Amino acid sequence: MKFFPKSSKSSTQAIPESAEIPQHIAVIMDGNGRWARKRFLPRVSGHKRGVEIVRDLVKQCAQMDVKFLTLFAFSSENWRRPDDEVSFLMGLFIEALKREVIKLHDNNIRLVLIGDRSRFNADLVAQIESSEQLTANNTGLTLSIAANYGGRWDILQATNKMIKELPAKQGVFTEEDMAPYLSMHYAPEPDLFIRTGGEKRVSNFLLWQLAYTELYFTDTLWPDFDSKAFTAAISSYKQRERRFGRTSEQLTAGN
Ligand code: IPE
Ligand code: IPE
Ligand code: MG
């Protein structure tokens, strides 16, 4: 286990600071298949184009001084897809890691993978581990890739570890007890969630962590999610009033 500084407090336990620019952005990159179908291309060409969009978004986030970018690359339910698509996605993932990790490192970006690695082949696990190790001490953007990730899996694995490691609590736990065992323990909760591709659902992404996140849904398909589309998401975020349970009047009074 790597060392991570303690993250900010839970949004349900203490009111977080709201910054102009979201400190943590979490994205469901959806619509690759439909983008390809519209062009009479195989679904996989949408995934390929999707990787290029990831590269552009990472660059923009680093420039804007966003601290955490978390991307949903493969869900625990995506194994249900046809075998050839699953193998293509795994191949694309390992290729992209190999190709991009040096560039990430040169740009002071820390790479972290969240999700259950037990179903990945040894090659992919080795590539993930070496990429994480190489970039572990970088202090710029933290890029988290959620692969074979599911929000329910995350809550359950955290609960199981906590029960095992804290027997003195006799089964009575607080949010603070749970926090270090969750996959994203090193990051504040997302300020902004973006889902491309038109669906209005969370698809088992960060269920615990999205408690007070601002949600943004766009019909733009992921391979079309360019800097203009990203700027529109940021502008929408800037117009939100983050109340965390309080009234609007309390906010204007500065409480
Ligand atoms: C998102 O695009 C990528 C992954 C889930 C890996 P999709 O492949 O889900 O694209 P659509 O939703 O079928 O268009
Ligand atoms: C969510 O997209 C997962 C990823 C983007 C990795 P899906 O395309 O798998 O979501 P559903 O199945 O439409 O909910
Ligand atoms: Mg989809």
Image (cartoon, helix red, strand yellow):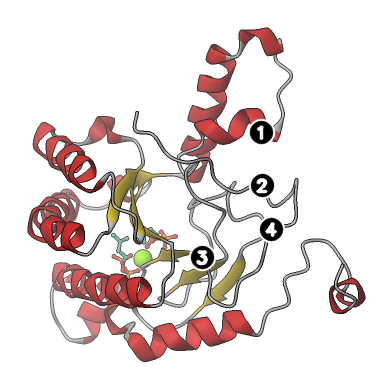
* Residue 135 visible within the image: yes
Amino acid residing under circle 3 = Gln
Disc 2 to disc 4, how far (Cα)?
8 Å
Amino acid residing under circle 2 = Ser
Q: Secondary structure at mark 4?
A: loop
Looking at the picture, does residue 54 appear above or below residue 239? above
Of the residues under marks 2 and 4, which one precedes in the sequence? 2
Marks 3/1 in contact by CB < 8 Å: the verdict is no
The residue at 55%/75% (across/down) is: 216
Disc 3 to disc 2, how far (Cα)?
15 Å
Residue 254 in the image, given as x and y percentages of width and height: 85, 73
Q: Which mark is residue 176?
A: 1
Instruction: Tell me the residue that label 3 is attached to.
Output: 23
Residue 6 in the image, given as x and y percentages of width and height: 53, 40
Asked if residue 165 lies left or right of residue 82, the reply is right
Instruction: Tell me the residue that label 2 is attached to.
Output: 10
Of the residues under marks 1 and 2, which one precedes in the sequence? 2
Specify whether tag 3 is near ligand 2 (CB below 8 Å): no
Of the residues under marks 1 and 4, which one precedes in the sequence? 4
The residue at 20%/78% (across/down) is: 36
Residue 236 in the image, given as x and y percentages of width and height: 58, 84
